[in-house]
Image: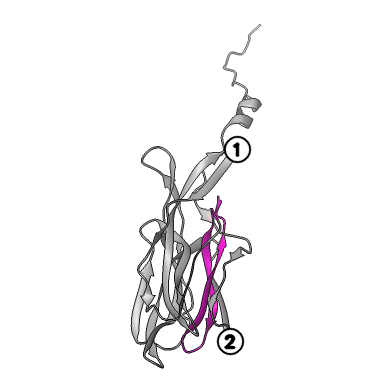
Amino acid sequence: MLVACGTVSPQADPDAAADAPPPPPRELRFTGPGDATMQYGTTGTPAFLDRCPEREALRGLTGSTATVGGGYVVVSQLAGQCGYAPIVDGDDGDLAVRASDGTSLPLRGTRSEGAWGSRCPEDQFVVGFAGHAGVALDQLAIRCAPLAITRAGGGWKVTTGPITQQDPAGAPGGAEFPVTDCPAGEVAVSVAGHADGEINAFGLVCVAPTPE
């Protein structure tokens, strides 16, 4: 009687498969309604609310300044500049969040005299702002921070790093308003405010990033 010979494939251990860590995320997404900051300035002109796509967050602003009645220099135009947040393998073996250019949001305001732009440092995103405002937005400076991702239990946690304030646009007329940052762990995804000939009020909408 002949007996067939061969090899027997080992059975996969279901417990080992269940205990295996999930694959690392490869990007951040920015979904949900978010948290709106206070808007500073006046609100009698048309409102705007411009949001980055859900795979992008705010990385900077561009626009113009103009001189208005009384010789005051104000922020007359602005547009949000969004960017992607890919997750890569870091040099130390951990994961790292990078930033790359993305969508340009609509330009708000109509007066244009002197162009300006303010972008976060490499691999950082907007997390706040500071400046001066009265009838118009006199001065605006964005505040930026890097993002870090670490394992937390069975998932991942994203945190913001040290905040740095960039050079302002405009001039220090009006009244200085409080430094305004997103809630801890959140980044800006929308620019909000009121505008007509110039920017009359400004604020942000922030959300917590989700690793995917």
Q: Earlier in the sequence, mark 2 or mark 1?
A: 2
Q: Residue at image x 35%, y 77%? A: 116
Q: Residue at image x 51%, y 88%? A: 196
SS for callout 2: loop
Q: Is residue 89 above or below residue 28?
A: above
Please, which colouring scheme is shown?
one colour
| Residue beneath disc 1 | 154
| Residue beneath disc 2 | 44
The answer to whether any part of residue 52 appears in the image is no
Q: Amino acid at mark 2?
A: Gly
For residue 40, side relative to residue 34 (left or right): left
Q: Which residue is nearer to you in this view: 180 or 30?
A: 180
- Res 141 → quadrant: bottom left
On whether residue 207 falls in the magenta region, the answer is yes
Looking at this view, name the residue that lies furthest to the top.
1
Q: Is residue 188 above or below residue 153?
A: below
Instruction: Give the magenta-colored segment's residue range.
Output: 184-212
SS for callout 1: loop
Residue 44 percent coordinates (x, y): 58, 87
Q: Residue at image x 43%, y 39%? A: 94
On whether residue 161 falls in the magenta region, the answer is no
Give neighbour class at mark 2: few <14, some 14-19, many 20+ (Cα, 10 Å): few
Q: Which residue is nearer to you in this view: 148 or 199?
A: 199
Q: CA distance from mark 2 to mark 1?
A: 49 Å
Give neighbour class at mark 1: few <14, some 14-19, many 20+ (Cα, 10 Å): few
